Image: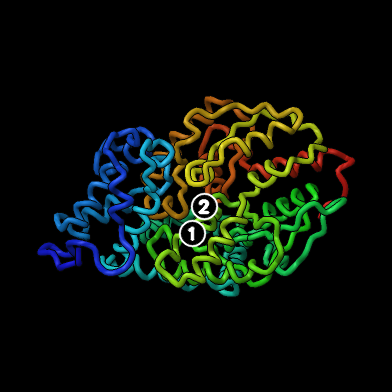
Amino acid sequence: MKATTAAGGGFVGYGPGEKPRWEEYSKCIHCGLCLNACPTYRELGLEMDSPRGRIHQMIQVDRGRLAVAESFVRHIDLCLDCRSCETACPSGVEYGRLVEAARGQIQEYYRRPAAFRLLQRFFLCQILPHPSRLEKLGKLLRFYQRSGAERVVLASGLLKLLPRHVAALAPLAPRMEKPFFTERLGAVVPAEGPRRYRVGFLAGCIASLAFARLNEATVRVLARNGCEVVIPAGQGCCGALQVHSGLRERARELALRNIRVFEDGGFDAIVTNAAGCGSVLKEYPQLFEHEQQAHYTAAQAFSKRMRDVTEFLDEIGLNSSFGRLERRVTYQDSCHLLHAQRIRSAPRNLMAHVPGINLIELKESEICCGSAGIYNVLHPEMASRLLQSKMKRVDESEADWIVTANPGCLLQLSAGVRASSRPERRVMHVIELLDEAYECNSASGRRI
């Protein structure tokens, strides 16, 4: 149905372009099994903030009974896009496709406040896709963090004068690590021992600045497992945040750049250590279903080689020359690893190889921690409620270390630990745990 202007503002019906499609939302039988899996429904108990309720609203827009206006936008925005409903759904509804298409319509046809549009365009379109700009901003942020200026600003209360979304960044702002991993772009790291595989490593945009040590650990662990690791120059932002925000055209541009950079490398696999990025990277073909066939075919070839690093290491068989780590550990499932990529066992299998690790299953590990890309900045109240619930479960586990598989989750859980009764707890990626275990073994060899 074509969009028409509604009396109360917004549009009735969907406009031209990508939109939620009948063949996708008609699979929903409204059984309600998604309700308890949905973090926002669990917190609010509102039908319209459940997957079933949001699909109902999408259908009403399609039928011309509901406008793409403030109410619809509010309920769609509040979704974390964690996709836990997909795991619970008996009918195979691909909810991620639906909510991202709905957000594309919102982005195209709903006029948000000017300040929101300015910040969104600045960060997602003018900074993240441009490595040189991102690195300059990272250097400024690193100076701000290390010069003492950050402490002064936080103590002064100046943040209270800023817009809510900007102020929410303060406790969540990633620490800029020196040196940036961007210095490794273009490098080829040889395998330790006989080469078994040649892999391309997609380092990420913000991760190359704020999680540079995690990226280095990832390269080391891959090399110790017989991988020649290529870090192609020219790679960049994967487009995940753009996809989740409805900026479909910008996401396509970023996807094409990465596809072209990695397509002629002769790689056995393309690897990422970020579950949120990996989900979108594997779903690049969805961006080109309505585009030129050549782009769709290239995206399919790319996605077939795409692997989360835990998935890849579990597939190839892990080098278990670990030292002993006597630690009580709990694992928080990253939503886009568990629900979008359907990878549950691999991280646990890898940790089970490390002597001394006592892995305590976290209750409700499948429920989102509240990070969800930049959700914790856009919706800090809901994100805080989810994080508080998560930290209660962590306290019940009595774990020394909290392990996860996504940089965004690392930031969110670290904020939770700092505010908890046990601020000494460590939060780490699965790969960082493996890297530390290798280093504990004196025979593990040189650092890369």
The answer to whether 55 appears left or right of 90 in the picture is: left
The reply to whether the C-beta atoms of the residues labelled 2 and 1 are less than 8 Å apart is yes
Place residue 324 in its image quadrant.
top right
Can residue 415 be seen here? The reply is: no
Place residue 352 in its image quadrant.
top right
Out of 156 and 310, give the one closest to the viewer: 310
Q: Position of residue 13 (x, y in %)?
A: 19, 61
Quadrant into which the N terminus falls: bottom left
Quadrant into which the C terminus falls: bottom right
C-alpha separation, residue under disc 2 versus residue under disc 1: 8 Å
Q: Is residue 47 above or below residue 446?
A: above
Secondary structure beneath disc 1?
helix
Out of 163 and 365, give the one closest to the viewer: 365
Q: Residue at x 70, y 40 (%)?
A: 433
Q: Residue at x 50, y 28 (%)?
A: 363
The residue under label 2 is: 279
